[in-house]
Image (tube, rainbow, N blue to C red):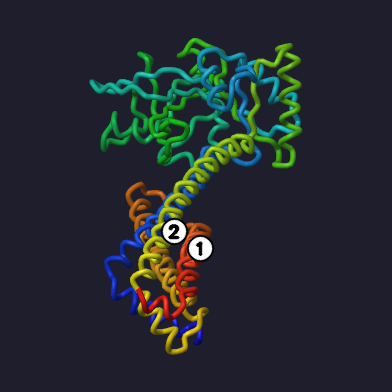
């Protein structure tokens, strides 16, 4: 028989036992659905985080300096330690800017607590930051309304503030905050601009952020300790050299390694490894689902073989060969797996579309996961169908007709 001629026979057999066929497909549907949705969401989350880092100024030629020892693990550990006690001072920042030829931009930041008052309204911001005017050069399209403060305002310790979207909404509602006076920790400031719509990163909501000149923040928070410093190298190729120069300057000044220098590549690498581990876990879950689906197909096909002994005997008696019987049952298993895989892909695409609309984040369908879904469902169908097909093919006509 021609291979394609087995398909009408297989479809007829499956349609005869519709409920059983549906339940058989269910395991494959769930397995492929898990592969499509979770892998796509994991990949989409990774791309989203990378895009957010770039939008926050962490491009390929940037790095962050923290005043914490290397024993503190990762970016989060270094930053949290530097929040309480940092070894980096504003004088160190000046030395880096003056003595590192591979560095094009240095933006130090001091973090503190900030309670804002406007009239009888009060708001506690989660991120009160003092930084130099160079921050505007790090972040693309930072200003939504108004302007960012200038170097002259930083040098003269002007009390001006640049606020996030949430701060503007909570304090001013529909009124424009530009040139309005607010009190931060009891000190009067003038609002000069509003930040673009931002997202959260590492648990920090940047819409809840206020920025002020570095020198002004030193006075307000009564500190010269720099919590975090963003550094841009002259080019991507010069990042390693800039890293060496910064380390040499700080070592000469501190006489010990009580700081960390993290390149954006390292930070992205850490995020990539975390997301990669998550994707592997997701893949393992999907693999288990497909394994269960494959076992289900094999069991149902073995039951089908047992129930159809007489059909097998009659077909062999009228001239069907063992390979014809083998392919008949193998094609049935492939159809079950194929339809299950197609339904799983469709449901996955629908769920991804809905989730992306709910969270307002683009989640393009991962075609790699679609490919693996198709491949795995086909592999499961073949693997699960081979043994029942061999068993059916090996029955003799006489034995099959006696059943």
The x, y position of residue 107, in whole percent, is: 59, 28
Decide: is 202 above or below 275. Answer: above
The x, y position of residue 82, in whole percent, is: 55, 18
Instruction: Determine the CA span between mark 2 and mark 1.
Output: 8 Å
> Would you identify the image quadrant in which residue 230 lies?
top right
Out of 251 and 192, give the one closest to the viewer. Answer: 251
Label 2 CA crowd tier, 10 Å (few <14, some 14–19, many 20+): many
In the displayed structure, does residue 264 sit left or right of residue 179? right
Answer whether residue 367 is visible to the viewer in this image.
no
Answer whether residue 357 is visible to the viewer in this image.
yes
Disc 2 vs disc 1: Cβ atoms closer than 8 Å? yes
The residue sitting at 65% across, 26% down in the picture is 261
The outermost residue toward the bottom is 318
Out of 302 and 149, give the one closest to the viewer. Answer: 302
Out of 300 and 366, give the one closest to the viewer. Answer: 300
The x, y position of residue 131, in whole percent, is: 53, 25
Q: How many marks?
A: 2
Quadrant holding the C terminus: bottom left
What residue is shown with label 2?
Answer: 294
* Mark 2 or mark 1: whose residue is earlier in sequence: 2
The residue sitting at 37% across, 55% down in the picture is 30
Out of 93 and 262, give the one closest to the viewer. Answer: 262
Q: Which secondary structure lies at badge 1?
A: helix
Q: Which secondary structure lies at badge 2?
A: helix
Return the mark for residue 151: none
The x, y position of residue 242, in whole percent, is: 73, 31
The residue sitting at 41% across, 49% down in the picture is 361
What residue is shown with label 1?
Answer: 383
Decide: is 35 above or below 51. Answer: below
> Would you identify the image quadrant in which residue 152 lies?
top right
């Amino acid at each position: 028989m021609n291979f394609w001629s087995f398909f009408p026979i297989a479809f007829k057999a499956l349609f005869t036992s519709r409920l059983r066929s549906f339940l058989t497909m269910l395991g494959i549907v769930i397995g492929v659905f898990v592969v499509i949705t979770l892998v796509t969401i994991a990949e989409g989350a990774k791309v989203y985080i990378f895009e957010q880092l770039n939008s926050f100024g962490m491009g390929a030629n940037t790095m962050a300096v923290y005043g914490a020892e290397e024993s503190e693990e990762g970016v989060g550990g270094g930053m949290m330690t530097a929040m309480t006690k940092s070894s980096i001072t504003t004088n160190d920042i000046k030395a880096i800017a003056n003595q590192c030829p591979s560095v094009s931009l240095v933006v130090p930041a001091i973090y503190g607590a900030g309670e804002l008052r406007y009239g009888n309204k009060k708001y506690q911001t989660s991120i009160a930051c003092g930084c130099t005017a160079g921050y505007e050069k790090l972040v693309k399209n930072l200003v939504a309304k108004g302007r960012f403060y200038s170097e002259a305002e930083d040098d003269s310790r002007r009390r001006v503030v640049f606020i996030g979207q949430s701060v503007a909404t909570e304090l001013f509602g529909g009124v424009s905050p530009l040139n309005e006076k607010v009190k931060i920790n009891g000190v009067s400031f003038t609002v000069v601009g509003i930040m673009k719509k931002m997202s959260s990163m590492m648990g920090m909501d940047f819409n809840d952020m206020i920025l002020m000149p570095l020198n002004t923040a030193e006075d307000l928070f009564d500190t010269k300790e720099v919590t975090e410093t963003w550094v841009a190298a002259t080019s991507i190729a010069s990042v390693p050299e800039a890293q060496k120069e910064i380390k040499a300057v700080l070592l000469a000044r501190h006489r010990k390694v009580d700081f960390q220098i993290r390149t954006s590549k390292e930070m992205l690498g850490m995020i990539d490894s975390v997301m990669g581990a998550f994707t592997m876990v997701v893949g393992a879950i999907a693999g288990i689902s497909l394994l269960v689906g494959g076992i289900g197909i094999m069991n149902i096909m073995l039951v089908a073989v047992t129930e159809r002994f007489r059909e097998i005997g009659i077909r062999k008696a009228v001239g069907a060969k063992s390979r014809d019987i083998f392919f008949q049952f193998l094609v049935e298993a492939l159809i079950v797996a194929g339809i299950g895989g197609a339904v799983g892909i469709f449901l996955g695409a629908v769920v991804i579309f809905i989730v992306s609309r709910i969270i307002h984040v683009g989640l393009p369908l991962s075609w790699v996961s679609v490919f693996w879904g198709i491949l795995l469902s086909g592999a499961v169908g073949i693997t699960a169908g081979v043994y029942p097909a061999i068993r059916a093919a090996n029955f003799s006509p006489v034995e099959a007709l006696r059943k």
